[in-house]
Every structure is written in structure tokens, then in C-alpha cells.
């Protein structure tokens, strides 16, 4: 779907989901501004049983002068094009209007498949982010629309529990690019909770389940704005018997949950991914994360199991599923390992000082994560076969790789970039990357994991590397303390049995 298609219509109606939130309002407003810029008139509507009443949303609509209309009667046909934003035409959470043509722009799980003009990107944190990218591609003059930047920023903020649940780099790009009104954003952030939600939070905490033995808590809340879940879990994590906390509630379209962890043996984002595996999505940061469970998938798999028991079972199972290895102290039985060597593979590289001065603080953004690093002389940014980027320092580059004078190309979902933290200058790494061939025939010990493992490596004792069953534990033959996890797919394409020429 191309956003330009919309310009072919003369009558355009933008519809937000019922009981609108900031993300659907901001997305609708973005499309409205785009059409206005192209001299088109459009209207933004919503329907459903309730008028917008939450303080932060009323403030949002009033301050940004959002031209939104409430349409209670859905029996009148809509002339021209109807675009549903942050929701899917025909889905439960949006009142259905009959229209000549229909289009969908959304970021939830795909629910509706019979609308041809659909752009649904389920791995993006907010629909505001999708709108931002669509408009950016059309060279939309964001500078002329400061209110819109504030709206999109707040749309992402509320949809990702205050940026905590962000996993996609595109969301980070939007967050970093918006020149928002700090005074309004601060007021909105402090009008987050209604008195009713304060009560809901209090009641939820009274009924929390605490497992003192395993040191976790599970809290069920009545329906409320999803970001209230994060506030409750921040609070409950401060209980001395609690190291991991999960707070959840059931909404019309699924179960939202928030995860907090204060121990290095369990990353909150891993716990969130574990809980939602196969039936939803979850992720975020090491200490704060969140996720979503699709209620239909859940019921198909777990029938009538109470959600409280499900969450407790999943946390117990998570805590049981991984062995923990401290590389510094580990005494590994090498006889269970095979000997392997790296194959000659082509990788990409960029010499860091070709882009930045020595000492520059840089963030490298990839699909997987943000890496903060200080540029050193003789530092190279390596681009691996799955698009991962990692630094190689000192003389290691010359020892391990032979440069070839060819550009390096690969297909990626998100183009990795390096950004100067202070100036904001950014470089898409693939545009500068050249090829090199790994020449290491140095043997390593490796073993296929039959169970999950968390390895605290000798160079990072605070943050484990996670290995699932099927991945490989690799140990340097020269240094038995030098051990790490290699992803199954990467291992099988980049390693071979030792002695193979
Ligand atoms: Mn949304």
C-alpha cells in the first residue's frame, strides 16, 4: 500500500478506533495533516458507546486542536474512502460504517484479511510510528507541523508503556526525531491516571499473589489504561520478597501485561518473551518490559486455565528452564564438546574512524538493539551474516580478517546505523561497508545445547547471553574462560568441523 493512493480520492474519512487512545488520535491527525498539505479536505471521526473523557486525552485533543468528530449513528453510508487507523475495518474494537472504499493502517496482530488496501505492521510499537515513516518517505514538512510531532511522540509514549516496551528500532528513530512541546508532554504525563484508575491500582495490589520461595509476584488488575500496569509493577517490585513482578489485565482484544525484574539472572524482556511465546508478543528492556497475549490463541491452547495460574506457571517454568554459567568460575567438562573452526565467510566492515573522530560517543542501532560505544583508533564495526553489528578492536581485525576491495551488500529489514550521540549525525553502515573474509582457522570447542543456558561471560558479568536448546555453547581452545553462545543458525552456517580445509 502506498499512501499516495489516498490522494486519488476527493472524499476521505479517517476513522479512529472506539474508545480512542492517544495513538489512534495521533495517527488520524497525521493522515489529516498529510492530506491538508496536499490541498485535500478530510475529516477524523470515531464512534462507539463512549465519548473521549479521560483527562489526558481531553487535554491532548484540546491543546492540539485535534479536529475530531464523534459520530454515534453508523447507519449513514460514508461517501468516498474510509481509512481506519490503529485498528482494522470490521474488527471488534471499531464501529463498522459502510463506505465506497476502505483502507487499513494498523500495527496490531492481523485480524482482518479481506481488505485489499491494508498496511498492517504488527512488529511496530505504535501506529504513530508507521504514519511517521509513511509521511517521511513522502518528504512531509514536519517542521511546519509542531503539534503533529508532539501528537506522534505522545502516541508512541502511551502505546509502549512510556517507551518501556519499545523493541523495534523504527520506534526509537521516531522517538528521537520528534521535536515535541516539552511543556504539554509534561502535563500529559502527569495526567496519566484518573481517580478511578488509582482505585483500580490499589485494589489490584491488595490482591497480589506473592511466591516468597521463588521470589516473584503476579498481580491481576481490572481493566485500565495499559500504562497503569507499569506503575503498579514498579511499585510491587520494591517489596523485599519480590525480584520479578508481572501485572496483567484482560481487555476486549487480549491480555496486556507488564514485567519488572531487579535481578541479573532474569531479564524482564526475556521473561516477557517467554510468557507470550506462541500466543502473542513481548519484549522491552532488561529491567522493564511488557507484552500482549492474543485471547483467541490463548483459549485455543490453554482452554479455560485461569490467567493467574497461567502467569504463575510460566514464571515457575521460566525459572526452571535455564542453567546459569559464570564463565569466570566455570569448570566445564570439555570431553562433551566437539572441535570446530570458523568457515571462511564474507562479512562487512566499516573502519570507525572513517566516519567519526577518535573519542566520539556513538550509538549503533540495529534491528536487535542499541549499542553504546566510544570510538577508538583501529576500531572496526563488523556486520555479521544476520545483520548484527559488533565492534572489533586493536590488532584483532588484521589477525582475523582479510579485506577485499568490494562493497558489502545484504538485505535487511532495518538498515543498521551509527549515530553521533552529541551531534545526532548518522550514517547508514551498509552504504560505507566493504567486504572482508574471515581467515580464522583457530579451533574452538562447541556443544549443542539440550537445555536453556544463561552465560555470564568473562567480559560482561552483569548481563547474560541467552542460549536456547539447539543453540551452541562455544569455548576458545586457548582460554577456557572465554565462552559464549552462538545462535543455532549462525553456528551452522559459519562453523565447520575442525581440520576441514
Ligand atoms: Mn496503537
Image (spheres, rainbow, N blue to C red):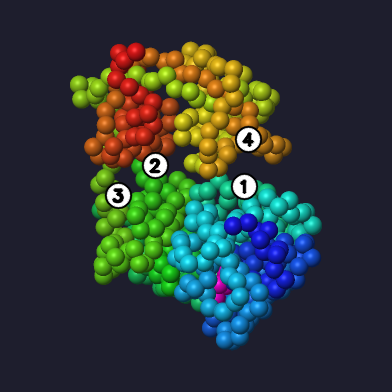
Judged from the image, the secondary structure of the residue bearing numbered disc 1 is helix
Residue nearest the viewer, comparing 363 with 342: 342
Task: Write down the region rendered in magenta.
Answer: 17-21
Give the distance between the C-alpha atoms of the residues marked 4 and 2, in whole angstroms: 33 Å
**Nearest-to-viewer mark from 4 and 2:** 4
How would you classify the magenta stretch by its main secondary structure?
Answer: loop
Instruction: Please report the residue visible at 37 percent of the width from the left and 14 percent of the height from the top.
Output: 442
Mark closer to the chain start, 3 or 2: 2
Judged from the image, the secondary structure of the residue bearing numbered disc 3 is helix
Give the distance between the C-alpha atoms of the residues marked 4 and 1, in whole angstroms: 13 Å
Using residue 471 as the reference point, say whether residue 221 is left or right of it.
right
Instruction: Please report the residue visible at 52 percent of the width from the left and 59 percent of the height from the top.
Output: 120
The C terminus lies in quadrant: top left
Judged from the image, the secondary structure of the residue bearing numbered disc 4 is strand
Determine crowd level at label 1: few under 14, some 14-19, many 20+ residues with C-alpha closer than 10 A.
Answer: some
| Ligand 1 lies under 8 Å from the Cβ of mark 4 | no
- Report which residue position mark 3 lands on: 318
Disc number placed over residue 264 in the picture, else none = 2
Q: Is residue 197 among what the camera can see?
A: no
The mark tally for this picture is 4
Judged from the image, the secondary structure of the residue bearing numbered disc 2 is loop
Using residue 415 as the reference point, say whether residue 80 is left or right of it.
right
- Report which residue position mark 1 lands on: 173
Mark closer to the chain start, 3 or 1: 1
| Ligand 1 lies under 8 Å from the Cβ of mark 3 | no
Residue 216 rendering spot, x and y as whole percentages? 33, 55
Q: Quadrant of residue 447?
A: top left
Residue nearest the viewer, comparing 431 with 152: 431
Give the distance between the C-alpha atoms of the residues marked 3 and 2, in whole angstroms: 14 Å
Disc number placed over residue 267 in the picture, else none = none
- Report which residue position mark 4 lands on: 428
Mark closer to the chain start, 4 or 1: 1
Amino acid at each position: 500500500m502506498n499512501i499516495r493512493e489516498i490522494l486519488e480520492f476527493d472524499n476521505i474519512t479517517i476513522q479512529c478506533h472506539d474508545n480512542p487512545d492517544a495513538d489512534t488520535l495521533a495517527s488520524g491527525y497525521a493522515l489529516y495533516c498529510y492530506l491538508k498539505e496536499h490541498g485535500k479536505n478530510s475529516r477524523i471521526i470515531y464512534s462507539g458507546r463512549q465519548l473521549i473523557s479521560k483527562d489526558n486525552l481531553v487535554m491532548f485533543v484540546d491543546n492540539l486542536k485535534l479536529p475530531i468528530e464523534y459520530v454515534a449513528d453508523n447507519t449513514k453510508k460514508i461517501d468516498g474512502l474510509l481509512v481506519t487507523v490503529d485498528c482494522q475495518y470490521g474488527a471488534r474494537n471499531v464501529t463498522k460504517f459502510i463506505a465506497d472504499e476502505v483502507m487499513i493502517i494498523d500495527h496490531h496482530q492481523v485480524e482482518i484479511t479481506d481488505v485489499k488496501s491494508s498496511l498492517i505492521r504488527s512488529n511496530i510499537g505504535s501506529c504513530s510510528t508507521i504514519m511517521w515513516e509513511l509521511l517521511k518517505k513522502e518528504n512531509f514538512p514536519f517542521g511546519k507541523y509542531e503539534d503533529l510531532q508532539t501528537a506522534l511522540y505522545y502516541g508512541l509514549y502511551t502505546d509502549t508503556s512510556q517507551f518501556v516496551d519499545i523493541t523495534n528500532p523504527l520506534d526509537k528513530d521516531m522517538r528521537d526525531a520528534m521535536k515535541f512541546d516539552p511543556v504539554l508532554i509534561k502535563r500529559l504525563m502527569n495526567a496519566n491516571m484518573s481517580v478511578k484508575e488509582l482505585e483500580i491500582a490499589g485494589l489490584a495490589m491488595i490482591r497480589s499473589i506473592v511466591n516468597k520461595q521463588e521470589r516473584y509476584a503476579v498481580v491481576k488488575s481490572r481493566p485500565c489504561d495499559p500504562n497503569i500496569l507499569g506503575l503498579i509493577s514498579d511499585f510491587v517490585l520494591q517489596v523485599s520478597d519480590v525480584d520479578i513482578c508481572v501485572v496483567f489485565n484482560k481487555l476486549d482484544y487480549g491480555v496486556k501485561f507488564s514485567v519488572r525484574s531487579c535481578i541479573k539472572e532474569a531479564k524482564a524482556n526475556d521473561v516477557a518473551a517467554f510468557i507470550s511465546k506462541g500466543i502473542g508478543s513481548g519484549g522491552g528492556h532488561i529491567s522493564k518490559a511488557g507484552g500482549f497475549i492474543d485471547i483467541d490463541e490463548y483459549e485455543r491452547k490453554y482452554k479455560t486455565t485461569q490467567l493467574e495460574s497461567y502467569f504463575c506457571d510460566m514464571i515457575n517454568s521460566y525459572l526452571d528452564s535455564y542453567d546459569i554459567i559464570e564463565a569466570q568460575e566455570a569448570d566445564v567438562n570439555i570431553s562433551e564438546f566437539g572441535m570446530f573452526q570458523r568457515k571462511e565467510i564474507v562479512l562487512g566492515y566499516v573502519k570507525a574512524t572513517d566516519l567519526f573522530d577518535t573519542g566520539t560517543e556513538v550509538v549503533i542501532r540495529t534491528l536487535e538493539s542499541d549499542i553504546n560505544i566510544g570510538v577508538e583508533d583501529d576500531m572496526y564495526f563488523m556486520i555479521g551474516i544476520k545483520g548484527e553489528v559488533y565492534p572489533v578492536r586493536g590488532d584483532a581485525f588484521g589477525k582475523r580478517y582479510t579485506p577485499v576491495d568490494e562493497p558489502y551488500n545484504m538485505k535487511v529489514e532495518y538498515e543498521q546505523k551509527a549515530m553521533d550521540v552529541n551531534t545526532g549525525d548518522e550514517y547508514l553502515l551498509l552504504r560505507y561497508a566493504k567486504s572482508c573474509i574471515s581467515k580464522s582457522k583457530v579451533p574452538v570447542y562447541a556443544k549443542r545445547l539440550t537445555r536453556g543456558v544463561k552465560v555470564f561471560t568473562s567480559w560482561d558479568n552483569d548481563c547474560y547471553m541467552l542460549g536456547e536448546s539447539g543453540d551452541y555453547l562455544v569455548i576458545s581452545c586457548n582460554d577456557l574462560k572465554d565462552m559464549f553462545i552462538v545462535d543455532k543458525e549462525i553456528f551452522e552456517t559459519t562453523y565447520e568441523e575442525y581440520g576441514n580445509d
